[in-house]
Amino acid sequence: MIFIDFLLAFVIGGFICLIGQLIMDFGKLTPGHTLSILVVAGAILSGLGLYQPLIDLAGAGATIPITSFGHSLTQGAIAEAQKHGWVGVLTGMFEVTSSGISAAIVFGFIAAFIFKPKGKAN
Amino acid sequence: MEQEQYKNLEQQITPPTPYMKNALIAFFVGGIICTIGHAITYFYIIFFDFTEKTVGNPTVSTMIFLSMLLTGFGLYKKLGQFAGAGSAVPVTGFGNAVISAAIEHRTEGVVLGIGGNIFKLAGSVILFGVASAFFVALIKLILVTIGVVQW
């Protein structure tokens, strides 16, 4: 049912953000630290084979949070390592997850010429 | 003033962190952003021939495009002050970090300003993502090679 599908995306996605907020508040960490921890957590979960089931379950609820960035980097590296061994670990890294970084760079570059700065860290 | 006294005073004055409230706001805002992402997922599956496996990339790109608009008009900053991790953890927050740095440093020039600072805020995410992916994949390769686990 489509409603359940959206509800799962909402709950899982919200839950990952909630964990991030707890890390931030209880650890007294900056967002930069928190996001780094989440990315590493995503990579480790991916290596254990636990992140893909989460994506199958929650769709965008698991692909939108930054943890999925660590996951897709790891999946790229693992897939290439399967084919080419040691070398693949390095070369496969960005195989799966080119879009997040390239979109951010392209849109950032365009935005820099369109928009005026509005004070520190918009 | 002694350092300890200062610390005590600082603790008295600083308002206690509203853990519960912050966590709930992060949950709802983060959840809503992911729900929007999920709707975009359906859009790409229905109107373009993406499958559930490949739909992640166009969805992420579209979300970062939306993030560009919100960042450019100064709205993402306001959302961030309200939502904390709720707007920072989704990929739109990553986009916001890159895009706001690019806009902010435009005045320092295209190469040294934009080019040199675009990953000022988001660089650590890329660094730790790539480094951890490298070590996780390496460990997995070693474990498979010595026959502890399967691919």
Image (cartoon, helix red, strand yellow):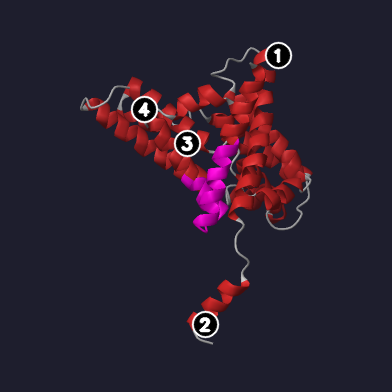
Chain of the residue on which disc 1 is drawn: B
Instruction: Check the image and report above or below for B35 versus A4.
Output: below
First in sequence: mark 3 vs mark 4: 3
**Amino acid tagged 3:** Gly
Task: Tell me the element at label 1.
Answer: helix
Disc 2 or disc 4, which is closer to the eye? 2
Number of the label disc, if any, that sits on residue B47: 1
Residue that protrudes farthest toward the bottom in the picture: B1
Instruction: Check the image and report above or below for B28 versus A94.
Output: below
Q: Are marks 2 and 1 on the same chain?
A: yes
Instruction: Check the image and report above or below for B21 versus A17.
Output: below
**Amino acid tagged 1:** Phe
User: What x and y, as percent, mark residue B58?
Assistant: 63, 25
Identified at 46% across, 24% down, the residue is A53
Number of the label disc, if any, that sits on residue A70: 3
| Residue labelled with disc 2 | B5
| Residue B142 can be seen, yes or no | yes
User: What x and y, as percent, mark residue B87?
Assistant: 65, 44
Give the alpha-carbon distance from disc 2 to disc 4, as whole Å: 57 Å
The region drawn magenta spans A14-37
Q: Main secondary structure of the magenta part?
A: helix
**Amino acid tagged 4:** Gly
Q: Are marks 2 and 4 on the same chain?
A: no
Q: Which picture quadrant has residue A91? A: top left
Identified at 68% across, 13% down, the residue is B46
Give the alpha-carbon distance from disc 1 to disc 4, as whole Å: 35 Å
Q: Are marks 3 and 4 on the same chain?
A: yes
